[in-house]
Image (tube, coloured by chain):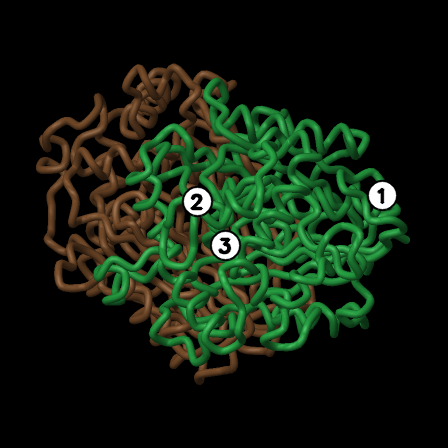
Chain colours: A green, B brown
Amino acid sequence: MSIYVHGIGMTKFGKLEDKTMKDLLLEASIEALKDAGNPEVDAVFVGNFMGGSVYNQEILGAIVANDLGLGYVPTAKIEGACASGGIAFRQAILGILSGEYDTVLVAGVEKMKHVSTIEVTEAINAAMDNDSNEKHAGLTFPGFFGVLANRYFHETGATKKHLAQVALKNRENAINNPLAQFTKPATIEEIMEARMITEPLGLFDCSPTTDGAAAVVVSKNKSDIEIKSSAQASGPTQMQNAENLLSIPAVGESGRLAYEKAGLGPEDIDVVEIHDCFSMTEIISSEELGFFNRGEGYLAVEQGRTKPDGDKPINTSGGLLSKGHPIGATGVSQIYQITHQLRGTAVNQVEGAKIGLAQNLGGTGSYSTVHILERV
Amino acid sequence: MSIYVHGIGMTKFGKLEDKTMKDLLLEASIEALKDAGNPEVDAVFVGNFMGGSVYNQEILGAIVANDLGLGYVPTAKIEGACASGGIAFRQAILGILSGEYDTVLVAGVEKMKHVSTIEVTEAINAAMDNDSNEKHAGLTFPGFFGVLANRYFHETGATKKHLAQVALKNRENAINNPLAQFTKPATIEEIMEARMITEPLGLFDCSPTTDGAAAVVVSKNKSDIEIKSSAQASGPTQMQNAENLLSIPAVGESGRLAYEKAGLGPEDIDVVEIHDCFSMTEIISSEELGFFNRGEGYLAVEQGRTKPDGDKPINTSGGLLSKGHPIGATGVSQIYQITHQLRGTAVNQVEGAKIGLAQNLGGTGSYSTVHILERV
């Protein structure tokens, strides 16, 4: 069975003081449904991470069904840390493949800007294992990815400048994206000199906290955007269990599965959204996905190969770093951007893009989803 | 395609001070896997509601996969308020029907006894819509179901004694269940005179807060317990949108779909687990599921028809009221009890039980799942 994208919607990402989580969720959903021609919907899956802990709001699935008047349709919220959106998208696909549903609405949302940095950091740390000494010793996500960056520098010869080149590229992409959180130009010097978060990751190397939502309508009915494959993998939930700090195995495995199912390889992919929660993550994951050799992803950045006019454009949306990272929405917003690219209507449009890939990561590599879409 | 239950596991329900949420989750999962003959597992779904908000612990799917050494398998947490477990079970079924997975582990868990009543009440209220005035006006779940009970009394002639008969039956069932939270005998007078929670619901009419976990292994490989149908429906997320306070439409609709898919009717069901979050809920839902006429469910209770030796045994496990209600685990623990009944190994075994039904409710009727299982 083939499955297709029929509609996409996305709110502005950023600090959206006058909108509740529900407002954002409904806004993106209504836009996606309208874009799909307001079809009958058989189920709703919502990706969300911290609605319960910081906003005291669960039951987002039922809220969407109720407030949009979708009737008795089955709904659920899906959580897989920062991969919640990608996993929700995958559940929609499995639901259609199962024969239970013809058309499914997937939405992702997060509201993170109305609470203090400490509160949001604590909520994010729910994506670490309570039984690990790392969490209680004070490891944070910038800490984890900072360790990976230092190791990567040591092994490959990459430097902080290469991370800054990732951050700069994604900022330059975001400048053209009216829905992105950060659209103010930056220079390489400004990025290099920004305040340190966790050595060697400075402010521009870390994705921000963000309010926002995105939604996608998928169906077994034909459209011009086909979902060629959906894959998901798990990895270590603790850094101390990582066998190799230059690798995020869940990314590699989900990529391998996605290529195998689609009958495609990295060389076939025209445009990519990678989960750049940190600048370092984009480089490692670009290697995991087979776009570049191990330890050489930073050279591809240096050579401009990942820019919109390069041979492997990555994060033309601005990525998590500059488009923003409303956790539950991120994976869904990647599908939004790839769909626009394949329709030929994207910001930073890649000329003739026919096949796109979206990779969404959760935790310290605990979850990864990869979806490959093709214009047909 | 047919899908089967291969293994079941369940921890003690109650106040389990020396065990973490993860301990409980792994204990039930290991038992279910062992019961299934330790098969290779292709995916894991975890039902959980308040792990993030009261325990700062998400990523339960990845934790199970990692700690049990299941490898790269896809995992997710599923949230649908108190129906999280039933919806997780349904995702496993859809995953197998989709052709992506052969064998799936479903687990549900909640840890609720280590925080104050106020904290747990606030966490539970995340299952109401923040944008409704009811929530902010102070409506709680006992309040909601208390309103339903008063209306039911007014319309049908039922009294508080009928609610007490439900609570007494479920307590008497729990006495035989070593895994139940409340195994101390009670009398109808004690139940009638217990302290009021929300008029007319007294202490015994309300399900408790509970620590506990349950797990089930399902597979497309044949076993002697077949899942005949899986159905799910949504309903109003706000009481003010309920059209009829004597009805919980999501329960009726999920039941109707489940019967239709299975080619069965209420008359074919030998044993039932109903989501008795309150004594009143058991009666209304027993009508919604077609076991008794509208407004006559209380008479069936009075006549002893829902006892283990009656013609429609309901909640032979002790139900939520006395077995306990660890939110995310509840829907999965219903499958545990029904499977035992169909295997002929249950507490309060119903002689010759061949077909069983489990109904799991979330929120103020926001979610309902119904699963019908048959010994084949």
Disc 2, SS:
loop
Q: Residue at x 30, y 21 (%)?
A: B139
User: Which amino acid lies under the numbered mark 1 shown in the image of this protein?
Assistant: Arg
Which disc is residue A343 wearing?
Answer: 1
User: Which amino acid lies under the numbered mark 2 shown in the image of this protein?
Assistant: Ala
Residue A151 x/y as whole percent? 43, 73
The label nearer to you, 3 versus 2, is 2
Crowdedness of circle 2 by 10 Å Cα count: few (<14), some, many (20+)?
A: some
Q: Chain of mark 3?
A: A
Q: Chain of mark 1?
A: A
The label nearer to you, 1 versus 2, is 2
Up the image or down, B134 lies above or below A46; here it is above
Can residue B230 be seen here? no
Up the image or down, A14 lies above or below A192; here it is above
Do tags 1 and 3 sit on the same chain? yes
Q: Residue at x 54, y 66 (%)?
A: B74
User: Which amino acid lies under the numbered mark 3 shown in the image of this protein?
Assistant: Phe
Q: Chain of mark 2?
A: A
Residue B166 x/y as whole percent? 27, 40
Disc 3, SS:
loop
Q: Residue at x 71, y 35 (%)?
A: A176
Circle 3 is placed at which residue position? A278
Which disc is residue A194 wearing?
Answer: 2
